[in-house]
Amino acid sequence: MARILIVEDEAKIARFVELELTHEGHEIDKAADGRAGVDAALSEDYDLILLDVLLPQLNGLEVLRRIRRESTVPVIMLTARDAVMDKVAGLDAGADDYITKPFAIEELLARIRVALKRRETASSSATAAPEPAHHVLSIRGVTLDVERHEVKVGDDPIELTNREFEVLKALMENRNVVMTRDRLAHVACGYDFVGETNIIDVYIRHLRSKIDDRHGIKLITTVRGVGYVIRED
Ligand code: CA
């Protein structure tokens, strides 16, 4: 369970997200304008903040700047579709992640889990001795070793470029979650990526030729008009 603040002036969206997060067991506060958002963020101890960019009083970027002067609380920005400048500015201003409206609630929940987990890891590694984590993802005979940067199908090693590796890792980490091209580009190419996201189609094609075609499996599924997913059987 986490304490989450939603800063969003569109009451319907705020209410919908609140219901979903409450259902997940989180405790929710809401603020309907930028100024109320800053006040709440700095006076209460939240585990995470969902912050809309377009807000009355103060816009989301200004809200974020003011929060960042005093707090490292994870912030996920809600941005309009194709507002690339908002995303870049938000990440520059210290946002941990962003999600594009309209979003699927499953994707938002997945992002929230990642952000909360990252915070947990960060705070536990700050207090405890660093653990030699050996992080291996495995789905349907395909294994990906994060530290060693190795991918295998069965015992057969697969040579991947850095970006192919990052795309595959993102899909394996978010198994059963449909990842948009935008999201994959962001993970594989970095926060500053502002180019054409159909570059992702090229990486997927390479991954399929190196993994699927060579080993007679169908690992990555295309979700038409949305993106890609690796589903567990
Ligand atoms: Ca808004």
Image (cartoon, helix red, strand yellow):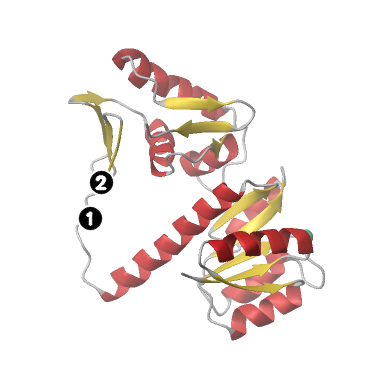
Query: Could you say whether the residue bearing mark 1 is in a helix, strand or loop?
Result: loop
Q: Which mark is residue 209?
A: none
Mark in front: 1 vs 2? 1
Given contact means CB atoms under 8 Å apart, are the residues at marks 1 and 2 in contact?
yes
**Where's residue 1, x and y in %?**
46, 69
Q: Which mark is residue 133?
A: 1
Label 2 Cα neighbours within 10 Å, binned few <14 / some 14-19 / many ≥20:
few
Q: Mark 1 or mark 2, which has the lower sequence index?
A: 1
Name the kind of residue labelled 1 in the image: Ala
As displayed, is residue 134 above or below residue 35?
above
Residue wearing tag 2: 147
Q: In which quarter of the image is the C terminus?
A: top left
Q: Distance between the residues labelled 1 and 2?
A: 8 Å
Name the kind of residue labelled 2 in the image: Glu
**Where's residue 108, x and y in %?**
57, 52
Residue 128 shows up from this direction: yes
User: In percent of the image, x 51 and y 23: which residue is there?
Assistant: 202
User: Which residue is more in the foreground, 98 or 3?
Assistant: 3
Which image quadrant shows ligand 1?
bottom right
